[in-house]
Image: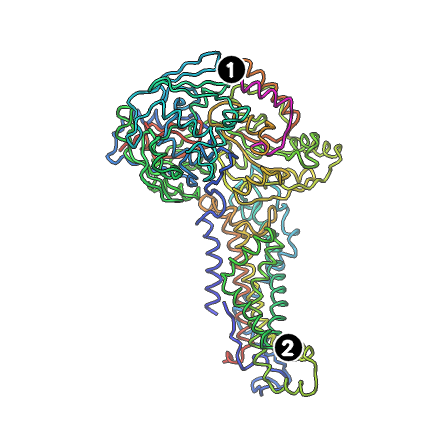
Amino acid sequence: MKKALFLSIAAGTVLTFTACGDNGDTNNTETDNNAAETDNNAAETNNNEAGNEDGEEAAQPAEDQTLIYARGGDSVSLDYASVTDGESSRVTQQIYESLLSFDEDSFEIGPGLAEDWEVEDDGLRYVFQLREGVTFHDGTEFNAEAVKLNFERWADPDHEYHFADEGYAYSVYGTQFGGFEGDDGHVIEEINVLDDHEVEFVLNETLGSFIQNMGMSYFAMTSPAAFEEYGSAINENPVGTGPFQFVSWSKDDSIVLEKYEDYWQEDLPKLDQVIFQVIPDNSARLTSLRSGEIDIMDGLNPDDIDALEGEEGIQMFERATNNIGYLGFNEDKEPFDDPEVRRALNHAIDKEGLISLLYAGMAEPAKNLIPPDYLGYNDDIDPYEYDPELAEQMLDDAGHAGLEIDLWTMPVARPYMPDPERAAEVMQANFADIGVTANIVSMEWATYLEQTEAGEHDLFMLGWSGVNGDPDYFFGNLLHSDAIPGGNRNFYRSDEVDSLLDQAKTSIDEDERVELYEEAQEIIHEDAPMIPLVHSIPVLAGSENVQNYVPHPQTSEPLTEVEISE
Amino acid sequence: MEPTSPSKNSPFPGPEHQEPQTSVPAAASPWKEAFRQLVKNKLAIVGMIIIGFFILIAIFAPLLTTYTYQSMSAADRLQPPSSTHWFGTDDLGRDIFTRIVYGARISLMVGFFAVIGALVFGSLLGIIAGYFGRWIDMIISRIFDIMLAFPSILLAIAIVAILGPSLQNALIAIAIINIPIFGRLVRSKVISIREEEYILAAKAQGMKSGRILFHHVLPNSTAPIIVQATLGFGTAILEAAALGFLGLGAQPPTPEWGRMLSDSRQYIQSAPWTVLFPGLSIMLVVLGFNMIGDGLRDALDPKMKS
């Protein structure tokens, strides 16, 4: 009798308290190899209280310059160009550098491994002057040959370091430069080594985002000697020119980096060691921060922001919004091939409600695909207002009253969608209000991306974050018909939009690009291939002792200047 | 949680060999005697009150609350318990009391149907294995062994993974994983009954196997089955909650207790009521069934009589 009593109490309690233990299915590492989604979320530092306020106190540097950065999931690979997940680039940005680099809090482009560059022949020829005296972590000198080798490695499927047989694919290279060697759209015709520290890119067509692309962490430089030494194991043995060099990686736990003593920037980096620690559960990560076990944490629950406000020893950082969370339609399936149905459902979603329920206000409702501060953002678009009655009426007129749909939702928290399952429940309730029955469907992350790419879904939730500040990275990957199968999971095909996007992509005249993108957005709004939901503001928290940490609009940033004070 | 080891001394002896009962009037049937024992057991009474209470709120759910279990309100999110929201609200502003009350329907229903399913199929297989023996017994018993070799929740997860996550499939999975538990119990019981003289007598009269099984063997094995079924209720509800917690059971917006726990687990510090009440409900129901089950076992087991 006692035994049964004990057992049932134990069972009940265990179940109650596993509650706080692990977090089951959400928030996993992402295994997103198919260029599906780049979680490089947003940023720009609106409130940079960290740097300013603490600076005044003239904090003394601490003796132990080890920074522990906690995050929800592990990196997929440290070969940055072959994966698109934000957790991979978070680490590779410390180890590797690109020819150009972005400003610390914007996508303003500036020198990186190249000190200077010239645009010639009306944007058909780019010449980069490389920095001298830069060495890779293995001692190899960084020069023009290294640049040529890296780019040819991605472009040429037959290149000895392309590792196609080992399953490596460089999808972002493909979307950013119009394909690979031999493809019609591939814009890089040749790369010439002019001298040891001067390299020339010859294009066969202008590319509006070429210079921005050169700053992306996808196109960073790996040591040529390391390819020879490690071959396809380069993904676990990264050798770059960055401020930190690779020490060890224990999967699903931590990645340890240490200061590169011969780094080309004098007196940098300031940290001696950086550890990227995986703590899957958002609440557990916050507990670790509070107890001082970690220094910075990504992925703060929006609900914890209030509690942390003014808490002793903790500071918070915001990344400016640089993403979109959306609910997409599969236009290849009935009745979503009917624009009237898509417009009706657009009226059904209460975005403000979604934001107050799930984002604690840290998001703004979206009406376009690109974030508001992007080049070409069309602010004249009149959003589909939340109006359940109108929505129901429109659906009825279209002959689809009482529709039953499958609503696919992501199994992992994303920067643009902190709790996708909850968001799905909210939208399910919104749809129920107009008489539409939505069945929530969820599956493992990699499968989810695969199946939506294959068009198995009705409606699906997903998002996208910018990594180079260029609108083409959004439009081209998500709504161009060339991205089928691929990022265009809406199966949206519009010749008009395709041609506008193509023109905008190859144009190097900014005003012209703005016009083209604005026009494209009008058509897209009318066609309604998706319900744009939110542009979110990801929030991070850190110890007060962390100095000079400035979140970048991408998911992550180099920690070169970061320092720990007493 | 194995409730009773099938003993040679049947707790519910057949009429053929009724033991003389000294303390009870001769007219009292064994069932009446068992019931008398049961109501003397205070814990069993408490268990019955708990379960009775949950059955009542499940039946009268719509009368107990003015909210619907799926209506959301941003203004009311994470409200602590108050006179308007007795158990507070969750992160989507839904009334937790309402969800608990409707959740009782789900949990009790899952418990009931899963146990019935496991009982019917388990008993059937157990009787066949126990009565016919030889290779039939061999095959059925080995299948039971294989199923029992898996941790039950793992097997349930595997079954739901194959069928797809839904409340109905979770129910089927729970029924399946409980089949061998009933099966083995009945089998061992049948093996001991098979050797009884009254079975031999029945056979000698030329009675058909089916009739012997269902008219003599089965009625004489009911006591342990009833005990196991009562305890199984608790386990089934717990397993359903576990599957719900893992997102493999009831799908939103169905208010399932285990799912409510997992959905609110990140608020355990800031809004503990969101996990406290679903957790408490699961605990109480499981506790209730276990108390009744224990009481029944004591009442039906002659060895336990003081």
Q: At which x and y percent is residue A464?
A: 52, 31
| Left or right relative to A253: residue A499 | right
Q: Mark 1 = which residue?
A: A508
Q: Which residues are magenta?
A: A487-510
Q: Nearer the viewer, residue A553 or A3?
A: A553
Chain assignment, label 1: A
Q: At which x and y percent is residue B112?
A: 62, 62
The kind of residue tagged 1 is Ile
Farthest residue, direction left: A63
Does residue A292 sit above or below B7 in this rendering?
above
The answer to which quarter of the image holds residue B107 is: bottom right
The kind of residue tagged 2 is Pro
Chain assignment, label 2: B
Q: Mark 2 = which residue?
A: B219
Does residue B200 sit above or below A499 in this rendering?
below
Residue A490 painted magenta:
yes
* Discs 2 and 1 carry the same chain letter: no
Crowding around mark 1 (Cα neighbors within 10 Å: few <14, some 14 to 19, many 20+) is: some
| Left or right relative to A433: residue B247 | left
Does residue A356 sit above or below B176 in this rendering?
above
Q: Taking the image as drawn, is residue A293 in sight? A: yes
Does residue B161 sit above or below A364 in this rendering?
below
